Image (cartoon, rainbow, N blue to C red):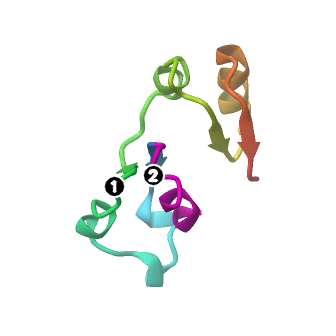
Amino acid sequence: MIKEFEKHDNCIFKARLEEKFLPEKDKVSTEYYSSYKNIVFTEKSTKQQNILSKTNTKLFISHCGVNGLNEAMYAGVPLICIP
């Protein structure tokens, strides 16, 4: 998915990345992730509502848990669901 995000340099992507869920071969240093110009990575939990309520949020890619689904629908943000 990251390779696809890179192709759209006119967009900014925000991604929450938890290393504990990555396969060992994919765990790399924070500097690696800062090399992307249009992808903002965070390991911290953020309030989805704060992001979804922004007028420039155009799409929400989610595992579609019930909270995220409800928050996206309330904010009127289209979803791509990846269970």
Q: Which residue is farthest bottom?
A: 25
Q: Quadrant of the N terminus?
A: bottom right
Position of 43 relative to 51 (above/below): below
Label 1 or label 2, whichever comes before in sequence order: 2
Q: Is residue 71 left or right of residue 14?
A: right
How crowded pointer 2 is (Cα within 10 Å; few <14, some 14-19, many 20+) is rated as: few
Q: Position of residue 21 (x, y in %)?
A: 52, 65
Q: Position of residue 33 (x, y in %)?
A: 33, 63
Question: Do the numbered discs 1 and 2 sit on residues whose CB atoms are within 8 Å?
Answer: yes
Q: Is residue 38 left or right of residue 82?
A: left
Amino acid, disc 1: Lys
Q: Which residues are magenta?
A: 1-11
Q: Which of the numbered marks, if any, corresponds to residue 37?
A: 1
Amino acid, disc 2: Asp
Q: Residue at x 54, y 28 (%)?
A: 57
Q: Which residue is farthest front?
A: 10
> Quick one: 27 or 35, which is closer to the camera?
35
Q: Position of residue 52 (x, y in %)?
A: 55, 24
Q: Residue at x 42, y 33 (%)?
A: 46
Magenta residue check for 63: no
Q: Residue at x 39, y 51 (%)?
A: 38
> Quick one: 66 or 3, which is closer to the camera?
3
Helix, strand or loop at mark 2: loop
Q: Position of residue 43 (x, y in %)?
A: 37, 50
Find disc 2 in the rendering and name its residue: 9
Position of 69 relative to 7 (above/below): above
**Location of residue 80 by image quarter:** top right
Helix, strand or loop at mark 1: loop
Q: Residue at x 50, y 24 (%)?
A: 56
